[in-house]
Amino acid sequence: MKPNFKKLLTLALCASAFSLSNVAKADVVTVADLPTPFNDAITVDKKGNLYVSNAGNFGADGLQGSQVYSTFEGAEQDIWMENLEGPLGNTFDNNENFYVSNMNTGAIYKRSKSGEVSLFSSITSGGGMAFDKGNGLYVASYQGGAIYKIDRHGNATVFSDDPRLSGGPVGISFDKNHNLYVGNYDDGKLLKIDKNGTVTEITTLTQGGNHIAYLVYAGGHIYTTSLFTNKIYKVTLDGEVSEFAGSGNFGHKDGANLEADLALPNGITTNKAQDTLYVSEYYSSYVKAIRINK
């Protein structure tokens, strides 16, 4: 039986949207129950509201999902965008415009602050997305084995196509020094690309057939989801890997970090304070929140 969304919010969240101040430290807590499973990238806006791509299951023509959900405090989920083609990465720019990439077509759509949707750019097979401090948009190309940089006019150029990106880049995130971190889904390599484009391999996740889904930089560390181990890993910038959350059992059970059961954790993001992670699951409709102890 699925938990009551509004009841969970009342118990787990404080008045400022999606805060974990009333939740025991180091717990994994369910904060949303979306309309469907097969969810992917997740983004949080400045107010703490969550946005989740529904990538959908795989079919003959690729991913079957076509929507992005928005989840607001104390309310049911809304459809934020629709008529998409296997939506994966999503993010906001500094002006509160929303962007989503699509795996099937490589199309990148923009939803303006006022709600107008337009085709912003196009690359080979979209993936994770991240803005740098200068508001430049970077997009991982899963099937293209590259990272693209897109200017404010929608012009896309290859930022890096280093051979090590042939392992299927999906998750990307910037640190405070403008270094870009990239996780490969197919081979589990975690790469660092500095502002000059120099690529360094930090580590390789060897657990569960590799498969880094998404990652996020928060508080001096990288946090990665690993679907088939049902775990979230914490990685130092020197490449030291440790288990952060997930018992390894497939299922739905909140609780202490390493006792909680997850169902193919997939998308991951952090709030502005970088003290809370939000995680979507591919094989469930739930969104989890996990406090980061600083």
Image (cartoon, helix red, strand yellow):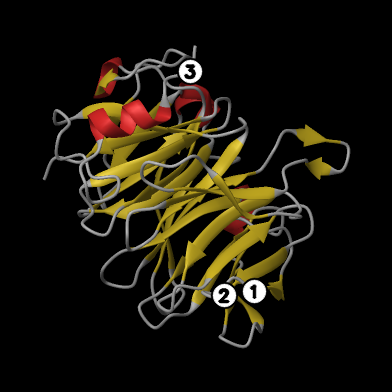
Distance from disc 2 to disc 1, alpha carbons, whole Å, reads: 5 Å
With 182 as the anchor, is 146 left or right in this view? Answer: right
Distance from disc 3 to disc 1, alpha carbons, whole Å, reads: 34 Å
The residue singled out by tag 3 in the image is: 2
Whichever of labels 3 and 2 marks the residue nearer the N terminus, that label is 3
The residue singled out by tag 1 in the image is: 116
What kind of element bears circle 3?
A: loop
Residue at image location 40% in from the left, 26% down from the top: 231
With 266 as the anchor, is 117 left or right in this view? Answer: right
Mark 2–mark 1 CB contact (< 8 Å): yes
Residue at image location 28% in from the left, 15% down from the top: 259
Residue 129 pos. (x, y %): 52, 62
What kind of element bears circle 2?
A: loop
Whichever of labels 3 and 1 marks the residue nearer the N terminus, that label is 3
Image height of 210 relative to 263, above or below: below
- The amino acid marked with disc number 3 is Lys
The answer to whether residue 62 of the structure is visible from this angle is yes
**Quadrant in which the C terminus is drawn:** top left
